[in-house]
Amino acid sequence: MNDLIREFEEIVTDELNLIRNESIVALKHVATGKYLSSIENIHYTTGSKSQVAFVSSQVLGPNALWKIIFAKNCYYDSHKGQHDYIYDSHNIKIQHIDYYKYLGINSGSYKSPISEHTEVSCGEYYHTDWKVNHSRLENSQRYLKSNDVVNLSTKKFYDNNGEYINDGYEAFLRSHDIQFSIGNDTFQELVCHNERLGGNDEWCIELIKQD
């Protein structure tokens, strides 16, 4: 009987930890322990000059809270009667909960301030879809849950010179210890790239609130 109770409690706990459509989450950069963030009315002074996206403090704050929204034409669209959980390899949009702007790569042709990888920013009309994949095979599973470590990637159709790329290629979300300044403020750079994956490409998704 105790085993049955324990198994039931584990099922309930797993259910509460699953990431669902419109869940509020934080994305922590595993290598530095800092959170993916954005601040309204602070814009890049280079590239697209869009609202800046960066990696900030190890203390979670309102600038680091995001809503997960299913992308169009994904599995969920044809299975709306089922539970709206996030699957491995699912496409999502990432929207800031305070500013309602989406994390994205704009046209994908703008360079980041220092490393000159692809700039990542926030915009109201961005159409960037992010594919979620567990970064560690031993943690791979059907559904995404709180504290899973993932890679996030998007399809890029322009090179850094603005030239169109037929069929595009996969670009992965990365942060690193490289910093840049806007006015008197310093930010840790956030980019997309198509290089070999490593520790700087890992993100821990923390569930703050289910829809």
Image (cartoon, grey):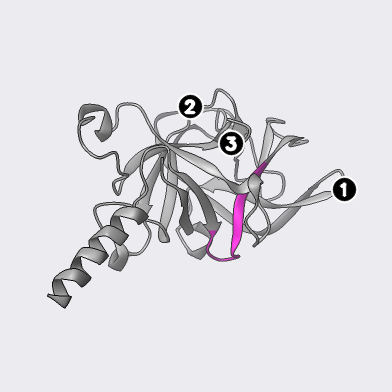
- Residue that label 1 marks: 184
At x 61%, y 34%, the residue is 122
- Residue that label 3 marks: 160
Which badge, 3 or 1, comes first in the chain's sequence?
3
Question: Where's residue 102, x and y in %?
Answer: 55, 33
Which badge, 2 or 3, comes first in the chain's sequence?
2
Task: Say if 49 sits above or below 114 in the image.
Answer: above
Q: Residues within 10 Å of mark 1 (few under 14, many from 20)?
A: few
Q: Which mark is residue 127?
A: 2
Kind of residue at disc 2: His
Find residue 131 and report its image quarter: top left
Task: Say if 113 sits above or below 165 in the image.
Answer: below
Question: Where's residue 71, x and y in %?
Answer: 38, 31
Q: Main secondary structure of the magenta part?
A: strand
Kind of residue at disc 1: Asn
Which badge, 1 or 2, comes first in the chain's sequence?
2
Looking at this rendering, what residue extends furthest in the left direction?
1
Q: Is residue 37 magenta?
A: yes
